[in-house]
Image (cartoon, rainbow, N blue to C red):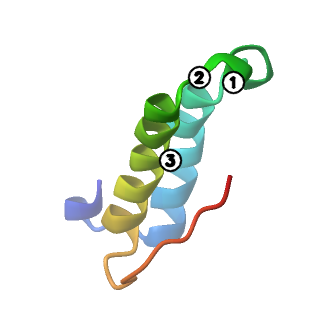
């Protein structure tokens, strides 16, 4: 989508609607059972989306 000139706000909306909603589906039920590796995998999805949508950002902080 980005290569077709879609603006950043639309990319964020598409990410939240199509990817994040799937990743977070039923999170209160399954999240207590995830491993540290699973948490890192979930975080990598967030970091990749951020790098694609906002390549000018040079850092990303997250807290558990």
Query: Which numbered tag is attached to residue 54?
Result: none
Compute the Cα span from label 3 to label 2. 26 Å
Q: Residues within 10 Å of mark 2 (few under 14, many from 20)?
A: few
Q: In the drawing, does residue 27 fall left or right of residue 38?
A: right
Q: Position of residue 41 (x, y in %)?
A: 41, 37
Q: Which residue is mark 2?
A: 34
Disc 2 secondary structure class? loop
Mark whose residue sits in front, 3 or 2: 2
Which mark identifies residue 14?
3
**Horizontal side of residue 9 vs 8, given as left or right:** right
Give the percent coordinates (x, y) of residue 23: 55, 29
Where's residue 37, x and y in %? 43, 32
Q: Is residue 57 or residue 39 the one in the foreground?
A: 39
Q: Nearer the viewer, residue 41 or 7?
A: 41
* Distance in Å between CA atoms under marks 1 and 3: 24 Å
Q: Which mark is residue 31?
A: 1
Element at label 3: helix
At mark 1, the secondary structure is helix
Question: Vertically, is 10 above or below 64?
Answer: below
Q: Are marks 1 and 2 in contact (CB under 8 Å)?
A: yes
Which one is in front in this view, the residue at disc 1 or the one at disc 3? 1
Farthest front residue?
Answer: 36
């Amino acid at each position: 989508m980005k290569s077709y000139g879609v603006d950043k706000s639309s990319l964020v909306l598409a990410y939240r609607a199509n990817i994040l909603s799937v990743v977070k589906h039923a999170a209160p039920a399954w999240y207590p059972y995830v491993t540290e590796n699973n948490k890192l995998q979930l975080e990598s999805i967030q970091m990749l989306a951020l790098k694609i949508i906002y390549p000018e950002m040079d850092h990303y902080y997250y807290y558990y």
